[in-house]
């Protein structure tokens, strides 16, 4: 049975929420304040933590900060539950690494949905990790023939870095010293204009490379890169990768094919932005994000409207109005910040 740790100082809210979760067939452990919650988390290793923010002894931010530094608890999904509704409070919680943020009062469906989506994400990631076969190769840079070999080399030889949601990997204009491989998470690359408007040029998901510039000229990054989810990457010096490619011609050809596919995808996106209707741009953008971020089309995606609008190449206000139209037509559903595809085939046919 799935085990939930509920940390809440209000006895009535704690008891009612625990009863609600138990009726939904979860095993619930409760804690009356943050200090007790940390002890229970370390002792019981719950599958997910639901935690209030304003509490005596230790607040929710402190709980998350402590547990995120513990090897045994840092990967446990964490949902904040709070009456604090200001954007800065929500942003603070998400920047610290929380997986979700629910504001009081909340309803049963909203809470259960948030818990189930987080648990499903963890399960999918773990399942995919278990399915992946280890590529047994000589890690020597002279024995790299395929992209799988190169990815194995990155994981064994490159530096590993973690980024929270919204953190910058590199800025446009920085020296392009590194190439990156994503272990998990999603990274957006984007350019900004003089008015500060952001245009997302590409989305990079788990097991994908990014950060390529010229191998023969010392030029700066032509765009910025930032994490759209909590993300872990490996980074390798570009000069080291260049030496590997010079010694492994087969790998070089495989990498050219990979980059060519990326260019084709970007061209398709630009054509869509230039010639498609607003409805088609919106529908295609939802499908694109679903493909990059979720493993199943029927899962909800939780992405800011401004990021979605940026990829579509339309104003955020226009994008939001078009979303409402797609919902009215029964193609998608909107639950708070979540977007869920209801009719994927007809969404693909939007024009």
Image (tube, rainbow, N blue to C red):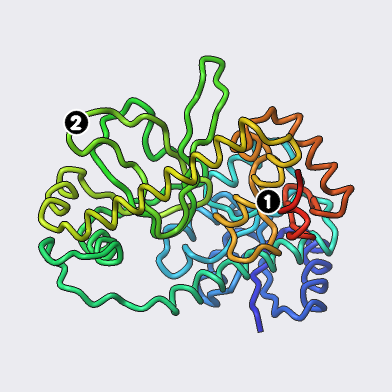
How far across and down, in percent of the image, does residue 346 sit?
78, 56
**Mark 2 highlights which residue?**
217
Residue at the spot 51% in from the left edge and 69% down from the top edge: 125
Residue 200 can be seen in this image: yes
Q: In this view, which residue lies farthest toward the right?
A: 328
**Mark 1 highlights which residue?**
101
- Name the element at disc 2: loop
Q: In this view, which residue lies farthest toward the top?
A: 194
User: CA gap, disc 1 to disc 2?
Assistant: 45 Å
Residue at the spot 84% in from the left edge and 49% down from the top edge: 327
Does label 1 or label 2 sit earlier along the sequence?
1
Placement of the C terminus among the 4 image quadrants: top right
Placement of the N terminus among the 4 image quadrants: bottom right
Disc number for residue 328: none
Reply above or below: 154 against 46.
Answer: above
Nearest-to-viewer mark from 1 and 2: 2
């Amino acid at each position: 049975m799935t085990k939930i740790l509920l940390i809440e100082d209000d006895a009535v809210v704690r008891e009612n929420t625990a009863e609600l979760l138990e009726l939904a067939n979860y095993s619930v452990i409760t804690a009356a304040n943050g200090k007790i919650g940390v002890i229970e988390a370390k002792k019981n290793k719950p599958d997910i933590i639901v935690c209030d923010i304003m509490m005596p002894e230790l607040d929710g931010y402190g709980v998350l900060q402590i547990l995120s530094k513990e090897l045994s608890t840092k990967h446990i999904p964490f949902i904040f539950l709070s009456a604090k509704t200001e954007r800065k409070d929500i942003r603070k919680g998400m920047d610290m690494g929380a997986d979700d943020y629910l504001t009081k009062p909340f309803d049963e469906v909203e809470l259960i949905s948030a818990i189930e989506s987080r648990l499903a994400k963890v399960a999918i990631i773990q399942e995919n990790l278990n399915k992946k076969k280890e590529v047994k190769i000589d890690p020597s840079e002279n024995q790299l023939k395929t992209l799988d070999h190169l990815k194995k080399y990155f994981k064994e030889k490159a530096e590993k870095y973690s980024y929270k949601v919204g953190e910058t990997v590199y800025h446009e204009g920085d020296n392009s010293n590194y190439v990156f491989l994503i272990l998990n998470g999603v990274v957006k690359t984007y350019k900004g204009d003089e008015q500060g408007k952001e245009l997302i040029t590409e989305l990079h998901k788990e097991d994908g490379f990014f950060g390529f510039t010229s191998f023969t000229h010392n030029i700066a990054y032509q765009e910025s890169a930032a994490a759209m989810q909590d993300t872990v990457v490996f980074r390798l010096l570009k000069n080291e990768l260049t030496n590997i490619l010079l010694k492994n011609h087969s790998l070089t050809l495989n990498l050219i094919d990979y980059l060519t596919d990326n260019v084709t995808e970007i061209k398709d996106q630009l054509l869509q932005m230039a010639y498609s209707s607003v409805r088609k741009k919106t529908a295609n953008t939802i499908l694109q994000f679903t493909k990059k971020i979720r493993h199943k089309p029927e899962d909800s995606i939780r992405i800011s409207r401004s990021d979605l609008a940026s990829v579509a190449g339309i104003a955020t206000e226009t994008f939001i109005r078009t979303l409402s139209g797609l919902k009215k037509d029964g193609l998608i559903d909107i639950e708070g910040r979540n977007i869920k595809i209801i009719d994927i085939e007809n969404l693909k046919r939007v024009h």
